[in-house]
Image: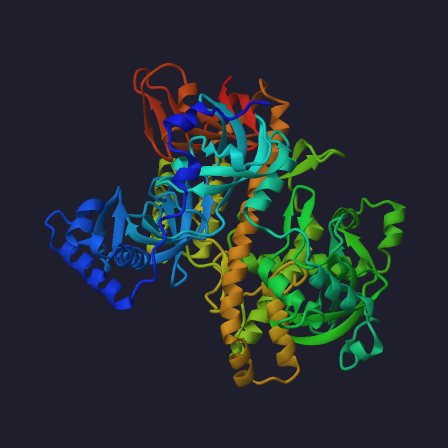
Amino acid sequence: MARHNPKHEKRKKSPEARSAPKKKYKAVKPEEQAQYSRRIKTFLQMTARKQLNRNELAQKCHSKRNPAAYQAAVEQLLKEGVILESRQNYKLCNQDETFKAETVRLAGNFGFIRDENGTEYFVPGKYLLGSMTGDKVLARNIESRTGSPEAEIVSVLEESQQARLSGVIVATEYGLCFLSNIAGSPLHIDYKQSCGYKIGDKVLAEVIYRGQRHMEHIVRIILNFGSADSAENCMKARIAELDIPVEFTEQVQREAVKVSAVGVTEFDMQGRADLRGEVIFTIDGAKTKDMDDAVSVKKNLETGNYLLGVHIADVSHYVRPNSPLDAEAFHRGTSIYYADQVIPMLPKQLSNGICSLNPGENRLTLSARMEISPEGDLISWRFEKSVICSRVKGVYEECNQILENTASSALEEKYQEVRESLFLLSELTEQLERRRKLRGAPELESTESALLLDENGQCIGLAPIRRGRSERIIEACMLCANEAAARTAKENHIPLVYRVHENPSPERIAGLKEIMLKLNQQELLLNPEEIQPRDIQKLLDDARDQVYYPVINNLTLRAMAKAKYSEKPLGHFGLALADYAHFTSPIRRYPDLTVHRILSDFLDGADQEWLTKRYQKFTENAAQRSSDTEVRAVQLEREADACYTAEYMQSHVGEVFHGIITSITEFGMYVTLDNMAEGLLHMHELPAGEYETEEGWYIRNILNGEEYRLGQELEVVCTRADVSSGHIDLSLA
């Protein structure tokens, strides 16, 4: 096994020495510390250079008279953000230009901080100041390139207690070092404090010394997950880095067993609408075990109106406020699905058991009963506590065969009881989709692909994700129920956690418009200041049959604001709806569980005053926590897709692929291959020449005029696939 080179420790101060605790002083009197605080601020204010180095300031303040009080004053002023330290120099902070925040996410060469008002800021990597997730920082605004808030960190006020990174062990001239996706260069390892490791291992490291940049940190290795060429190992390390709980505590498990063991009793069903005689069924993926939504439909032959029922597992009946189960669900926020794995929000006794709407079993539900006109308008609705017994466990692929009249006789027999309802739901879905299009809701297409894994969990292929008719049926039904839940809360003035999607920023729309004009779409008349959903839909419709449509779809997705949760009904731009909430997945999402809990109390007769007092602050906290955990889950799922895709492409290094340029940067171009994998064709892989770049648009060789433009088709070779980072490198074929 290769070892860390001890010669390096002779040239550089050891991690032990650099991270050694500072000299301890006796207790300090508050009045003495306050006196030094006044002196420090006075001298920094008086200096013409606007700053003093560490020794100068100490000398002017006569720190040797009471070093403990002086040091305490300096540390307190730094923590409060009154003064800043940079390269061993101190200066007064301009309070009007700075704000306090917390580092909430790090990803590659950038990060995000959140201020005390909940606003998030994008921070470029060079302005992160070595900050780690959980750090309390002082920051200031910088000019935004995208229209979203951007900032730079000017001081780390308080370091988080647990700063961890996942990465891979690499060989350097100094011996074995640790390379993470955040730090651009390998970090030195304190091997004396580390567990065993070797070249190519995927590991979890803890930062034990902080530098001014991420690349200056020193780490110790605390967990080794095995080869970094395994996507499964890489994801285990990333989950540990993000501190995502995988196992449930014994206390939570005990409560889950207790509440599920009783089953559905006659007492539980008292006071509920008994819908067990209705034709109600579920439609999910073939491998789904946590089925929390079921549907039913009838048609009023006199009016032509559809009577749609959406029946959702009443998880709030089992997960009580302030219980261990509730605390755990709040902490997790959402179930996380990646590759063939799931990290559930609730223990399987609930998610796959008592709360799953299994066929032939009595289940407690919260039902949305909606009347919809033949034109697809939501006329009226009501919610009720109910008990159902699902007739069939429908599977998307099988239902699609039924609807296409291509099903086998065995499938026809399985769905015989719900066949009429299935076709009626398909008819209703056509009207709901037509109404949605009339509202102008943009039809943005997902660019994701499905991962095909073998029995060992290794990725052996990629496949496009296709939505059949039954998938669209369930989506349309759930949208109706979600809208009805939001409108119920808004019209009755009761608190709720809403699903909101704000209008895209004018700056992002202006950037999109500029690119569209360069793609010869001169007829496009987007107004960045008054953008409407139907404007986005027209843009997509006009480009749908053109070769660069995938690029337009991708650029439009990037221009949109990110959906989130809020206690305020801010509307949903992407759905072109004024009111929207998540009601239909309480097994998998905490905001849905929150909506159920509030609606349940409302149905039990709680008035607006009581509900406001009980839930107003709670919905604020739940919305913020739900947004945070959703971002974390999406981040992990995207990284998993990248790692597993790179694992698949490792066996195709050297092969030629057809692709399209979907992004232009100052260092090269990203190409999406026909198999949906995306790789980087770096500038140094282009033919010899002198290149100029207009970021987001083209790369041009000024010696011969050859151009590589957004939307251009290319033949490329996969030259490298790194599973640990999820990066795929390409060259021209």
Q: Residue at x 76, y 82 (%)?
A: 271
Residue 626 position within the rendered picture, expressed as x and y whole percent measured from the top left: 54, 60
Question: Is residue 446 at all visible to an observer of this figure?
Answer: no
Looking at the image, is 197 positioned above or below residue 74? above
Residue 728 position within the rendered picture, expressed as x and y whole percent measured from the top left: 53, 28
Q: Quadrant of residue 281?
A: bottom right
- Locate residue 701 relative to residue 168 in the image: left or right: left
Q: Residue at x 76, y 34 (%)?
A: 455
**Residue closest to the eye, 358 or 310:** 358
- Locate residue 592 relative to residue 123 in the image: left or right: right
Residue 277 position within the rendered picture, expressed as x and y whole percent measured from the top left: 84, 71
Q: Which colour style is shown?
A: rainbow
Q: Quadrant of residue 129?
A: top left
Looking at the image, is 554 positioned above or below residue 624? above
Looking at the image, is 574 positioned above or below residue 578? above
**Residue closest to the eye, 461 or 76:** 76
Q: Residue at x 47, y 43 (%)?
A: 542
Looking at the image, is 608 positioned above or below residue 560? below
Q: Quadrant of the N terminus?
A: top right
Question: Is residue 426 at all visible to an observer of this figure?
Answer: yes
Residue 396 position within the rendered picture, expressed as x and y whole percent measured from the top left: 74, 49
- Locate residue 270 relative to residue 243 in the image: left or right: right
- Locate residue 623 relative to residue 474 in the image: left or right: left
Total numbered badges shown on the rendered structure: 0
Q: Residue at x 23, y 55 (%)?
A: 93
